[in-house]
Amino acid sequence: MPDDLSVTRPHDARMADMAARFGVRPPKIKYRSVPSWQPEGVMVFFSGRRSKVWIDPRFDDLPPPVQEAELAYVAAMIALRKGIVLQTAVFGVLAAIGTLHVLVSLLGRGLPFLLGLLLAYVIFLPVTLVVSALNIYRVDRLVAKVCGLSTVSADLDYVSDNPPGIVLRMLGPGPARRAARLGLDRSREDLGG
């Protein structure tokens, strides 16, 4: 979908309302394609002072409670942006150092190659997965606090039925674990589960 002035912007006002609930500046919304591994059709980007959100036509096909949940998750990620970006930057630097060490050890300098692999990947990968999961749990808790458990449940139900791409599934906890972490009773009808 082209991003130009002739495109109707039906979600701008809804996103602005949701951002206000979370006490954050509304992101700039662009209506364009989102990768297929994001089945909700929504992606948030942190760049500069103002966050950006891409929304594609798949978002319009979501049930209204799931649309609201997705907008809530975008607003929560923006609210927690500083912590998420800082952790990502720190682990990015650690990954670069680990990769550099592996390259240096291939040249015969520094620690032996296998020790470099151990430091760079066997330790770094699990730590990255834990940090990713902690960020997801933080966002879940904030959405539950601001919008209620029914909003989180709408998102978790959708993710259960429409799993994201393999990389996202590997990087974060599944819907059942996220629900358990919140103490969400998935069998109660009033929570959508």
Image: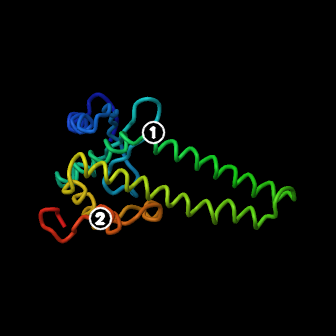
Q: Which mark is residue 82?
A: 1
Q: Secondary structure at mark 2?
A: helix
Question: In which quadrant is the C terminus drawn?
Answer: bottom left
157, 41: nearer the viewer: 157
Residue 1, quarter of the rendered image? top left
Horizontal and vertical percent for residue 47? 46, 35
* Circle 1: residue type: Lys
Q: How is the image coloured?
A: rainbow
**Mark 1 and mark 2: Cα distance apart in space:** 25 Å
**Residue type indicated by callout 2:** Ala
Residue 62 appears at what percent x and percent y? 22, 54
Q: Name which residue lies at 22% across and 58% down.
A: 154
Q: Which residue is mark 2?
A: 179
**Vertical arrangement, residue 57 with respect to residue 8, above or below:** below
Q: Badge 2 local density, few (<14 within 10 Å), some, or many (20+)?
A: many
Q: Is residue 114 left or right of residue 108?
A: left
| Left or right: where 32 falls relative to 134 | left
Q: Residue at x 22, y 68 (%)?
A: 186
- Which residue reaches farthest right? 108
